[in-house]
Image: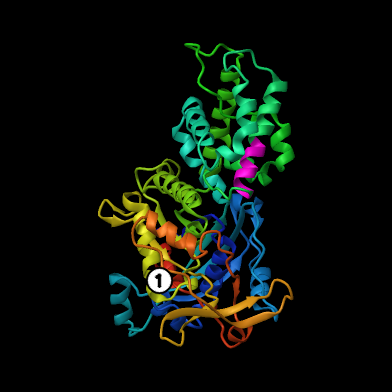
């Protein structure tokens, strides 16, 4: 069995990657001391995990920015706690696990002869966790689209609500170009800048998620936005279909198609190929489903379409990731912020995520290769009821005006429907003020954290059991 595990974590729509990875590392380190905190995780429950600690990375991972686990944990455990700062770059942390395993048949027989019936063997394994932007995951479907197909799909989306309200200047700059005319760098710069500004407006003003290329929105690894605008290799954008039967050499269509293909090869295929470790690779996709629902019908449709595209690309054995990892890849899909709902609401949250994934995630070939969860890697609320016995959650929220922490805030957000939201659902949520809702930011209760070694969670043990099965 492979000793090394590569765990790649991405997230869509402000899903909480940093908190998830911090909690996951902390769980690995603390589980041998408080196994009762992780009842659904077999290695912790049975005592198989003896010890875990962060260690210096090896190989190519050494060149990746270190994930700031200690600083993140300190922020959560501070007297005035705050959530760790999110970043938009690739980060990594490696842990060494020490595990106990019963001896095999031959060694067991030898131990009995030597009267060492209680003898156990120990082994060490390494887990490297890679954190990468969700925007980059959204580029995976581009590997199955040539430039013409990508352009057609992108321009069609830009012409429809909600993108149409933001896409006017970009569409004007792009449609002014005849794809068959000789390439002009001046016109290309103008079209590229207008397209970049549209992508940024769609993300910030429109709060949309399904935007490509993802590197244009998270360009830190290539030197930032200025580098994207300055370097010729990135100077491409969608073009309308050419009336010419074949794009002439040196035409706009030919030059931009060549750059698009190089982007797919060097920055999409190249990046996902780099995720492959020396042993087994597994993926985590985090999704803020509650945030998608509260963003309204258009925002929800966009966010869930983004999730569907990623899930389709990561489909075990048949999907794009199999090209990089050489076979089935285990994938966990998690709807985060489950602590914002009482228990029955969490069940509905998971059911809704299952509905969204449909046949895009599940078991294949007789082995479970993917799983969905409603998850809160660090739970910041506690379950309760109101005076009439109705379920709600309560916790600490920092006052945005004064900065003080109020630990008596109660909250009731309706459980999502098990199926697709209906027109009646959207109308009711709109009338109740849930569309465009200003979410409170629950924080861990400082007194509660001081009284325990572990971080409170919902479902993290189930996630660990699935992801580390066969490794810890």
Q: In this view, does 15 lie to the left or right of 217?
A: left
Residue at 57%, 66% (x, y): give it.
439
What SS does tag 1 mark?
Answer: helix
Give percent across and percent down for residue 163: 55, 40
Please name whichever residue, 32 or 396, is drawn nearer the observer in this view of the structure.
396
Residue lying farthest left? 366
Give percent across and percent down for residue 376: 49, 70
Q: Is residue 298 visible?
A: yes
Please name whichever residue, 460 or 188, is drawn nearer the observer in this view of the structure.
188
Please name whichever residue, 266 or 419, is drawn nearer the observer in this view of the structure.
419
Task: Give the residue number, with chain letter if any, for mark 1.
Answer: 345
Residue 110 lies, with reference to residue 184, above or below; the image says below
The magenta region covers 196-204
Q: Does the magenta stretch include residue 338?
A: no
Give percent across and percent down for residue 440: 59, 70
Give percent across and percent down for residue 402: 74, 76
């Amino acid at each position: 069995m492979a000793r090394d595990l590569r765990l790649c974590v991405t997230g869509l729509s402000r899903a909480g990657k940093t908190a998830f990875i911090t909690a996951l590392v902390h769980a690995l380190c603390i589980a041998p001391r408080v196994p009762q905190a992780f009842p659904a995780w077999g290695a912790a429950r049975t005592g198989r995990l003896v010890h875990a600690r962060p260690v210096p990375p090896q190989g190519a991972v050494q060149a990746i920015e270190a994930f700031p686990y200690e600083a993140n944990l300190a922020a959560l455990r501070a007297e005035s706690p705050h959530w760790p700062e999110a970043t938009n770059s690739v980060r990594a942390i490696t842990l060494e696990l020490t595990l106990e395993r019963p001896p095999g048949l031959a060694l067991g027989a030898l131990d009995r002869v030597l009267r060492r019936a209680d003898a156990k063997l120990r082994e060490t394994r390494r887990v490297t966790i890679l954190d990468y932007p969700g925007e980059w995951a959204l580029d995976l479907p581009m590997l199955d689209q040539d430039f013409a197909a990508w352009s057609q799909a992108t321009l069609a989306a830009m012409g429809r609500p909600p993108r149409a309200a933001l896409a006017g200047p970009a569409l004007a700059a792009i449609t002014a170009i005849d794809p068959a005319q000789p390439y002009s760098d001046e016109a290309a710069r103008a079209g590229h800048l207008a397209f970049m500004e549209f992508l940024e407006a769609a993300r910030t003003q429109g709060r949309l998620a399904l935007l490509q290329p993802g590197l244009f929105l998270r360009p830190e690894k290539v030197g930032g936005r200025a580098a994207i605008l300055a370097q010729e290799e990135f100077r491409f954008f969608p073009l309308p279909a050419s009336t010419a039967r074949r794009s002439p050499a040196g035409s706009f269509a030919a030059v931009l198609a060549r750059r698009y293909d190089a982007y797919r090869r060097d920055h999409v295929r190249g990046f996902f190929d780099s995720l492959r470790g020396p042993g087994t690779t597994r993926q985590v996709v985090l999704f803020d489903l509650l945030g998608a629902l509260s963003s309204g019908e258009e925002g929800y449709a966009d966010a869930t379409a983004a999730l569907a595209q990623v899930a389709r690309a990561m489909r075990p054995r048949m999907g794009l990731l199999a090209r990089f990892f050489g076979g089935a890849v285990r994938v966990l899909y998690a709807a985060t912020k489950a602590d914002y709902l009482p228990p029955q609401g969490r069940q509905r949250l998971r059911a809704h995520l299952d509905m969204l994934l449909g046949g895009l995630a599940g078991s294949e070939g007789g082995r479970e290769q993917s799983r969905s969860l409603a998850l809160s890697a660090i739970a910041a609320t506690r379950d309760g009821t109101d005076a009439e016995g109705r379920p709600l959650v309560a916790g600490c929220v920092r006052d945005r005006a004064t900065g003080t922490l109020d630990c008596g805030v109660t909250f009731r957000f309706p459980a999502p429907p098990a199926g697709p939201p209906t027109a009646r659902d959207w109308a009711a949520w709109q009338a109740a003020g849930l569309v465009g809702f200003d979410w409170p930011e629950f924080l861990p209760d400082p007194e509660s954290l001081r009284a325990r070694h572990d971080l409170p969670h919902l479902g993290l043990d189930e996630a660990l059991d699935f992801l580390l099965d066969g490794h810890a």
